[in-house]
Image: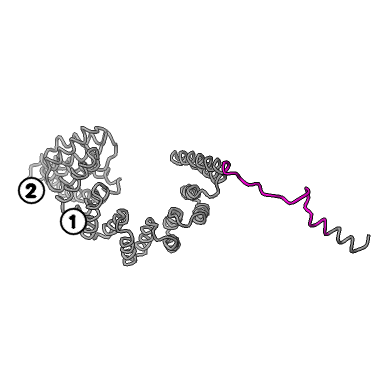
Amino acid sequence: MNRVLCAMVALAVLVVPACGGPKTVKKVSDEELKARRERAQQSYSIAMGYYQQGDLEAALKNFNEALVQDSMYYEAYVAMGTVYRKQRDAASAELYYRKGMKVDPKKAKAYEGLGDLFLAMNSLDSALAVYLQGLSQDSSLVDLYNGAAEVYVKKNEMAKADSLYQLAMRRFPDDQNVQRLWADFLFKQKRCQEAVNALLPVIAKFPKVTELRQRAVDCYIELKQYDNSVAQLDTVLQLEPDNNQALLRKGAVLMLQSKTKRAVEVFETLIQRDSTKAEYYAYLGEALIQSGNTGTAEARLRKALALQPGMAQAYADLGDIRRKAADAKRGTNLAATSTTNLKAAKSLYEEAKGYYVKAQADPSYAEYAKGQVEYIDKSLSLVEKELFVR
């Protein structure tokens, strides 16, 4: 065989595939594609169940199975990113959020998830870039405006945050969520009157959305417009008669108005509805203190502690009862106060201090309780000096 013939034979060996012919890709039938999507949806539903139960590993396994069945399953990519974020695996979370963005760049959740991931890591510039990327894909992705605005707030660029919300409101004049976010922004900036002005037209447009009314209540309380607060809460309760939280807030506002009798009635109604809630007894105790009925108030506060041991609100209120009693025993002129009363005041102050110290464990009551302890220490010093010279 000459060299040319040998070369031709070798070339033929190279171009002719093994197994006797070109390979073909098997076409997936519509029925099989439909079956795969159904299996993907089933795996996704199972994964969500595990996720809600807190079993993240099982959730990941089933979300991944959903993607094996349907590689274009956008929600599964976003869910995987969210699970990895919960597991503090930022790299994997970012990977899956970006895969979701690639599958469907017009949907908001992947941008929102990745932006929120960067925001939680305090990578503000990265977060902003993702939010703005999402908005450049589709400016109707409403959820992204709040994320970008929050970045501007954290960067103390309030004018940019303000401008972004204004833009969102112009683009979505009938979107209640945008209007609510704008009001939230104003409220956090202590621009409460502006927040009210922004909320009232939206409330008129969406009168049955109680969340909007609740935010208006927050604003009115800050503005000390308590009648308006109560009016909004009454409307909420007309729409949702069983909304115990709204009723509790109404009682608290009535206390701010010194309408103690009505407040007591509200808290007693709540206890009739649910006698297992410690906060109802604590608020009732405060209202009774305000009305001067300290004996009954103390009984209600101790009931609150029985239901929720360590409740700072109840300890602070018990401290108030003892401190006020001590002040009364001490009087304004120590030299004119009997020894018996001074000793009683000393004992009451010490008991009050014990309650306030316990209340200090709760950050929301720590500053108040600390101030009361300082007041009691000064009062005790004066009382003890007077007792010493007698």
Tag nearer the camera, 1 or 2: 1
CB atoms of marks 1 and 2 within 8 Å: no
* Above-or-below relation of 47 to 199: above
Q: Nearer the viewer, residue 125 or 14?
A: 14
Q: What colour scheme does the image use?
A: one colour
Q: Residue furthest right?
A: 1
Identity, as a three-letter code, of the amino acid under mark 1: Leu
Q: Position of residue 211 (x, y in %)?
A: 27, 48
Q: Nearer the viewer, residue 24 or 278?
A: 24
Q: Nearer the viewer, residue 212 or 192?
A: 212
Residue 343, can we see it? Answer: no
| Mark number displayed over residue 335 | 2
SS for callout 1: loop
Q: How many marks?
A: 2
Which of disc 2 and disc 1 is earlier in sequence?
1
Left or right, residue 258 beside residue 155: left
Near mark 1 (Cα within 10 A), the count class, few <14, some 14-19 or many ≥20, is some
Q: Position of residue 90 (x, y in %)?
A: 49, 53
Residue 135, can we see it? Answer: yes
SS for callout 2: helix
| Magenta-drawn segment | 11-32
Q: Position of residue 322 (x, y in %)?
A: 17, 41
User: Is the C terminus in the top left, top right, bottom left or bottom right quadrant?
Assistant: top left
Q: Which residue is mark 1?
A: 223
Near mark 2 (Cα within 10 A), the count class, few <14, some 14-19 or many ≥20, is some
* Above-or-below relation of 360 to 191: above
